[in-house]
Amino acid sequence: MQILSVSQFVAYLNETFKAIWDSNEVAIEGEVSNYRVSQGQWVNFDIKDEESLVSCFMVLGKLRLPIEDGMRVRLFGYPRVYPKYGKFSFNVDRVELVGEGAIKKALAALRAKLQAEGLFDPSRKRTLPRFPKRIALIASRESAAYGDFIRIVNERWSGLEIDLYHAIVQGDKAPDSVMSGIERAHKNGPYDTIVITRGGGSFDELMAFNDERLVRAIFASKIPTMVAIGHERDLSLAEEAADIRASTPTDCARRLVPDKRDVLFEIASLEQGIVAAILSQIEEGRRLIELATTGAEHWIENFRTRVASLLRLVASFDPKAVLKRGFAIITTEDGSIVSSVKSAKAGMPVSIQLRDGAIGARIEGRQAKLI
Amino acid sequence: MAKKKGDIDFAKSFTELEQIAAWFEEGEPDLEQGLKRYERASELAAGLKAKLDEAENRIKEIKDKS
């Protein structure tokens, strides 16, 4: 016979449980009841079916989805007797929801919680630069999503630096793998944006992008994020928390970079506008110069006209011009001009100067009246 | 990473080109300034076009060292 101390007995039980229970192969399925969280870090609840009930214990940090009483779940972990109180419980490492109804219910609860915290607030969304230079791409290198994304980016744009952070994009390891990509991108930055994408899949396959920790990591990213998961109709929490949500990997590439044909056209239009403007400036300059020259010509012409009329005026004072018009100048023998009848005496010899010469004459009489 | 010769900042050059176009649209009648800006705009447009014609996207996988 063997006698064990109480501690030895509990240790014996726990070792036995460990030896016979493979937590990767066996899970307990049942309904959650009496769910409660204590001190913000310990989760206690019961899992039960029609006949039995087991107490469960879990660390809050391991709980990825909110659970509540009445939900049907599968629990992964191991059975254990807590030495101090002798209480038997199931230590839970991982909870899986059973049935799409339960999952959707949990998802709706998580969405409401994160919404209330402001994780999807549109006012917090950042915009991306029109011409990104360097981006971090978190995707699976083997995926069609990656291929589609790269193909469309190459079709549309050039000169972009893409750093691929390969990630597992479905299953339990996906959230940590994507989060590791986000973390490493922050160390290797700067990036204009972090793009996270994967193609379509079943509801379960896309569940990784509803993981609360991943959604929070996207929300907390210092680099603007662009997330495209699945098809148009799939809306994951990760996409809702992103700065930019694209519906598919292809759509994501289109939103990320402009089409270079559009940009070339835009450059050509800008250039044409500038050429037209500079030509009109040159034309305007030429017009101003012409205007100035024509003005000077007008001035010179005016001056010329004025000078001519002055010259005419001056010329009109020339006695010779008067002679040309038929007038005569009468002078006495000593050369003084006879301008009045008073100075003319009968018999006086005079000289009459005409346009083309002078003739001698004698005064015959006089008349004190102008003809 | 060393910058290649003739490597331009696409976004910066494009913005500068847009600004020059906007300056002309405002219709400042300064021919001397205009000619200077026109010259710069031609240079920018040529650089932008060359960049789009030649450059390819560079893809590099960043391995997880941990």
Image: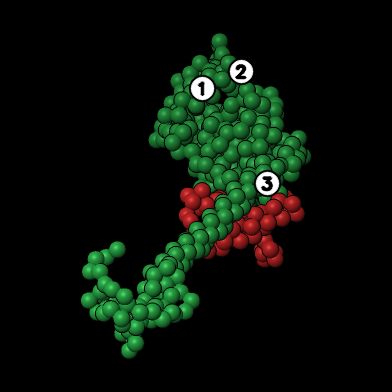
For label 1, the SS is helix
Residue A225, quarter of picture: top right
**Circle 1: residue type:** Ala
Label 3 resides on the chain identified as: A
**Pair 3/1: label in front:** 3
Q: Which label is found at residue A100?
A: 2
**Circle 2: residue type:** Glu
- Give the residue at x 45% y 38%: A124
Q: Are marks 3 and 1 in contact (CB under 8 Å)?
A: no
Distance in Å between CA atoms under marks 3 and 2: 49 Å
**Pair 1/2: label in front:** 1
- Give the residue at x 29% y 63%: A371
- Give the residue at x 61% y 61%: B39
For label 2, the SS is helix
Label 1 resides on the chain identified as: A
Residue A260, quarter of picture: top right
Q: Can you say whether B33 is above or below A66 in the image?
A: below
Query: What color is chain B drawn in?
Result: red
Query: What color is chain A drawn in?
Result: green
Graded by Cα atoms within 10 Å as few (under 14), some (14 to 19) or many (20 or more), the crowding at tag 3 reads: some
3 and 2 marks on the same chain: yes
Q: Residue furthest bottom?
A: A334
Distance in Å between CA atoms under marks 3 and 1: 46 Å
Image location (x, y in percent) of residue A82: 50, 33
Of pointers 1 and 2, the one earlier in the residue sequence: 2
Graded by Cα atoms within 10 Å as few (under 14), some (14 to 19) or many (20 or more), the crowding at tag 2 reads: few
Q: Which label is found at residue A108?
A: 1
